[in-house]
Image: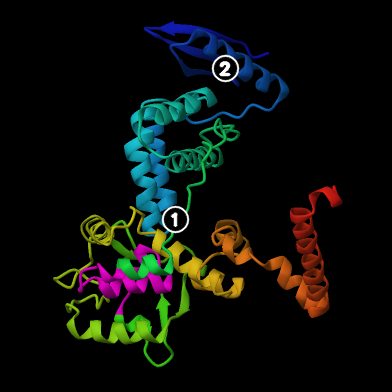
């Protein structure tokens, strides 16, 4: 029968046990109670035949191995860079020196709580950190470094839904009238296509079909580089107003020429800085227009609100926005234009019963009005 013990060396405790004639040491950290729990779990697994020997490796070494051997070849380049930033800037500084087998659920929850408490990161961003951590630990099981995933049942931070904002048609006209002439075509395109900022800045002249009034979305600007769009459904052909096509034709004559053939480049013909666009030109135009501060993404909401208000088909709106399903469109924008709901009951009534019901209601309202008049002039008689 296998037996084990706990040995303290310096400030750390170790689990020591012999299996199949081989002695194994496992680090349990500075907490003796944790070491006792680890020993109990290992002994129980050995006695029930469910024990699997794992390889020792630090989180830093394993996460680098995961990035090189798995992530680099399985995901888009931009996604791989995103994962690497999370590992290098957030996960490794906290877990890097720990052995993979010593990371516990409580440690991960402490890490998330610290990020929420001590950083200005949004719950969405912290949720990405947890997702990457779960993916790394899951791969560690497959590669034989862990027997279970300590992050498996941890829930991501609660994300409060941000209040959507959008410009009314009048506000949009005022905003566009106060933009700098060289940025007018860009902001007009954003408002009349619903393109994401990355899609807008990655647009090339070859993406515009002048004959059919269509703009083809084929790429996006991600972390300063041109890359594939957000998802497969983001690759789409947009139907745009003729006036926008006309404006883009005029813009083409004065647009800086560059190797990338971008529709909205910087003055040198290269990729425009997205942050500068927002801070120096978008926000300044809002100030000149006397409008409230909104996000650049709210132009996408403005576009959607305009389509909803004019009664466009939701399937068409979904396709224009590049959403993966119509449910996504409904969940995000179903409430955006409540005024569209006004008069819905009356329209339903008239479509079924026609003018006959309207006449009955008008007669009823007329009778009520006459009764109120009588009550006013002859209260003693009717009272």
* Secondary-structure class at tag 1: loop
Residue found at the very far bottom of the displayed protein: 211
- Label 1: which residue? 165
- Label 2: which residue? 38
Q: How many marks?
A: 2
| Left or right of residue 378, residue 202 in this image | left
Front-most of residues 275 and 242: 242
Q: Which percent across, then down, holds residue 121?
A: 38, 38
The answer to whether residue 245 is seen in the rendering is: yes
Identify which residue is drawn at 57% across, 33% down: 154
Q: Relative to residue 132, is residue 184 depicted above or below?
A: below
In which quadrant of the rendered view does residue 1 lie?
A: top right
- Distance from Cα at disc 1 to Cα at disc 2: 52 Å
Q: Relative to residue 257, is residue 15 depicted above or below?
A: above
Classed neighbour count for the residue bearing mark 2: other residues with Cα under 10 Å, few (<14), some (14–19), many (≥20): many
Front-most of residues 236 and 359: 359
In which quadrant of the rendered view does residue 279 lie?
A: bottom left
| Left or right of residue 286, residue 253 in this image | left
| Marker disc for residue 203 | none
Q: Which percent across, then down, holds residue 236?
A: 48, 75
* Secondary-structure class at tag 2: helix
Identify which residue is drawn at 39% across, 42% down: 65
């Amino acid at each position: 029968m296998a037996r084990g013990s706990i040995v303290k060396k310096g400030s750390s405790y170790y689990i020591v046990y012999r299996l199949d004639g081989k002695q194994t040491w496992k680090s349990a950290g500075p907490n003796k109670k944790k070491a006792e729990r680890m020993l109990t779990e290992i002994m129980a697994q050995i006695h029930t035949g469910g024990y699997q020997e794992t390889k020792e490796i630090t989180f830093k070494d394993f996460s680098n191995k995961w990035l090189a051997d798995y992530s680099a070849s399985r995901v888009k380049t931009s996604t791989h860079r995103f994962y690497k930033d999370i590992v290098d800037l957030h996960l490794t500084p906290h877990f890097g020196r720990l052995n993979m087998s010593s990371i516990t659920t409580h440690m991960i929850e402490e890490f998330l709580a610290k990020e929420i408490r001590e950083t200005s990161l949004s719950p969405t961003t912290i949720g990405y950190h947890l997702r990457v951590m779960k993916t790394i630990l899951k791969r560690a099981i497959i590669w034989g470094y862990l027997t279970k995933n300590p992050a498996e049942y941890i829930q991501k931070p609660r994300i409060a839904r941000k209040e959507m904002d959008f410009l009314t048609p009048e506000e949009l006209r005022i905003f566009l009238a106060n933009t700098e002439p060289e940025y007018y075509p860009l902001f007009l395109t954003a408002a009349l296509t619903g393109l994401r900022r990355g899609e807008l800045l990655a647009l090339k002249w070859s993406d515009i079909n002048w004959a059919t009034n269509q703009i083809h979305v084929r790429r996006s600007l991600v972390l300063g580089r041109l890359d594939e769009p957000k998802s497969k459904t983001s690759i789409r052909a947009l139907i745009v107003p003729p006036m926008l096509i006309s404006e883009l034709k005029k813009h083409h004559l004065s647009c800086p020429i560059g190797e990338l053939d971008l529709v909205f480049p910087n003055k040198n013909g290269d990729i425009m800085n997205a942050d500068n666009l927002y801070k120096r030109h978008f926000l300044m135009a809002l100030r000149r227009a006397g409008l409230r501060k909104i996000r650049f993404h709210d132009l996408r909401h403005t576009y959607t609100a305009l389509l909803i208000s004019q009664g466009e088909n939701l399937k068409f709106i979904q396709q224009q926005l590049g959403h993966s399903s119509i449910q996504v469109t409904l969940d995000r924008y179903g409430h955006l234009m409540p005024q569209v709901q006004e008069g819905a009951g009356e329209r339903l009534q008239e479509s079924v019963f026609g003018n006959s019901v309207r006449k009955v209601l008008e007669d009823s309202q007329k009778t009520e009005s006459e009764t109120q008049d009588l009550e006013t002039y002859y209260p003693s008689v009717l009272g």
